Amino acid sequence: MIEVRNQDTLLEVRGLHTYFYTYEGVVKAVNSVSYRLNRGEITGLVGESGSGKSVTAQSIIRLVKAPGRIVEGEVWLDGQDLMSCSEAEMQTVRGRKISMIFQEPRAALNPLFTVGDQISRVIQLREGCSRSVAERHAVEMMRAVEIADPDRRASAYPHELSGGMCQRVMVAMALSANPLLLIADEPTTGLDVTVQAQVLDLIRLRVKSAGSACLFITHDLGVVAELCERVIVMYAGRVVEQGPVAEIFSNPRHPYTQGLIASTLRVDIDKPISTIPGTVPDAVHLPSGCTFHPRCPFAEELCQQEEPQMVEAGRDHTTRCHIVSGRIEREMLEEAWTLETA
Amino acid sequence: MRLLQYVGKRLLQLIPVLLGVSIIIFTISHVLPGNPVYLFVGIDTTPEEIEAITKRLGLDKPLHEQYFIWLGNVLRGDLGDSWFTSESVAQDLIRRFPATFEMTTAALLLAIALGVPLGVLSAVYRNSWIDNVSRGITLLGVSVPSFWLGLLLIYVLFFLLRIFPPPSGRIGLLVSPPDRITGLYLVDSLVTGNWKAFISSAQHLALPVITQALVTLAPITRLMRSSMLEVLGSEYIQAARANGVPDRQIYFRDALRNALLAPLTFVALVYGNLLGGSVVLERIFAWPGIGRYALESIVVKDYNAVQGFVLLAAVLYVLVFLIVDILYFVIDPRITA
């Protein structure tokens, strides 16, 4: 396979496998995942809970919790292979080249230290500057993420701030590094809508102005449509479809993506909301063939027997489906999804 | 400022607690079967004489009146006289308490000094050799009774190896105790520069302290380990790692302070318990502390002494918890006054 390395590619993940070795068996949380992130672009990573989105992110910064382990794969960041770095080198990548924003801002802040302390500490670690310089910088960062009265707020403890405020603090901490790559793991879950929009604006603004890349993990397709240039859809540890947002939303090729889009409430089209039947499969005993076949309205015998390969489905748009690849001749009707609704 | 306010509030709260404690202690000792008057009389005492003694002791008055008289005495530091030692109970307790305090405090400090790092290391290097060694030590510590461990240590370290002196109390038989300032031999001998007494009392402290420390160490280590593991698995530690914070800082700055919160309550519980005197160890090591005093008083039905001891133990417990609450307040900003 000829690699086309785009000048704009910042992060390239190739054949990433992260498995969890549990008593019940091996969970292939991330199974042969490959994708690229471009500079100045926000890429949405979507999928249901348990599809391997967060583990993908943890794998990039090599912070997979036991019993998980990165089994194989390459992660290239700006020409550097992160998988072959030493742990000490990784520590200089984390919080400098790659920053991360977490899902639960309050849980991601240490309850026993003031937020100003926590931001300035990260700055001090990175810059090697004096404490007072770091503290000033921390207050500036807090002002940059529109925290009112940052001087006073800096001496507040996480429990004294609202969830939205805590998330701003996390964003300030992550952005203070001017990272090449920003990973945001469901950063707006649990925030109310106006705060959500503000946090998203902050992320967009910083990514665009700094020319960095952002991996935005979410299960909210609405946010993806609004924020992202590209989207990667994961199902049961595999990437099932990826491509530009406009393309994927107007012409989803994988039945799972179609189902996800059909199950999103849209204000512009008058149609009933459908659901994808069934649930995410048991991670230890994945279905044979295409892992989506038990829930797929178009599945045929081949889908149970053979795993589909990634195929071109359009311009810069790939998917993993026997129907798209032409192995199965069948039409995918959009009505299939609406029929499922009771 | 915030701290002072909190301490003040907690001290005020102590008043009803201690009043409650005093009522319970008084009630229990007065509803116990048996008439204390008979302790003072012979076989041929006439009913008139018994009545006179009852009157003299104030036992004919209503119970609540008796309580207030007793409480007034207690507040003046009068816990009554022990009829066994024929001295004031307060004096007896004051004389013996430093022995218990010195031994248990040293044992607890030793247990913390070893148990906390051991627990942290076994969490950080989970399932490594150090975790296994610590698991072995703690398993022994929880399963071996203290009297057996004490006797074993006496047998090996005194009788066989002669490393430590015999269990003959707080200081060598031929060494005179240091002049009393605090009653703590180590402190008093240091302050007065009495090296001979210092060395002898340190040697005599060693075995009971090691015994007590080993027993106390076990649960502290296990608690510290599990608490540390829980903290290390938390989001904010993951977030700190994602921000490139090096491991050493993660363990000792971010995690340790959080992980100390849970074992702190346990340490308070143990300390409160130990300060009431360890009856078994004080007996084995001929340690003249309040635990042994209480035991001897119970055996001879010395009610005043037992009552005084229980009151002291209760007050100590309450004080230890006051101190721990203040510590929590200092460490954890989430606790509000």
Image (tube, rainbow, N blue to C red):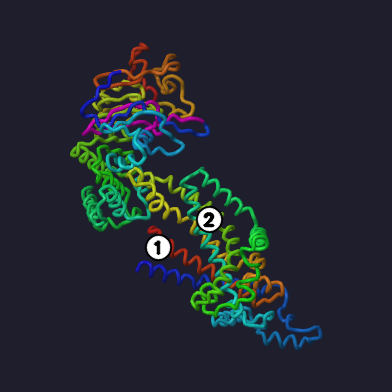
Residue for badge 2: B220
Q: Mark 2 lies on which chain?
A: B
Q: Which amino acid does label 2 sit on?
A: Ile
Q: Which residue is drawn at 68% across and 76% down?
A: B302
Of circles 1 and 2, the one toward us is 2
Q: x%, y% of residue A180?
A: 25, 38
Q: x%, y% of residue A339?
A: 38, 22
- Based on the displayed image, in which of its 4 quarters is residue A226 positioned? top left
Q: Does the magenta stretch include residue A28?
A: yes
In this rendering, the answer to whether B161 lies above or below B77 is above
Q: Which of A70 and A84 lies nearest the eye of the viewer? A: A84
**Would residue A128 appear left or right of B85 to someone viewing this image?**
left
Q: Does the magenta stretch include residue A37?
A: yes
Q: Mark 1 lies on which chain?
A: B
Q: Determine crowd level at label 2: few under 14, some 14-19, many 20+ residues with C-alpha closer than 10 A.
A: many
Q: Which residue is drawn at 41% across and 28% down?
A: A236
Residue range highlighted in magenta: A25-53
Q: x%, y% of residue A74?
A: 34, 29
Q: Which amino acid does label 1 sit on?
A: Val
**Would residue B287 appear left or right of A168 to someone viewing this image?**
right
Q: Which of A70 and A29 lies nearest the eye of the viewer? A: A70
Residue for badge 1: B330
In this rendering, the answer to whether B159 lies above or below A254 is below
Q: Residue at x 67, y 83 (%)?
A: B86
- Provide the secondary structure element on which disc 2 rests: helix
Determine the main secondary structure of the stretch shown in magenta: strand
Q: Where's the C terminus of chain A, which quadrant? A: top left
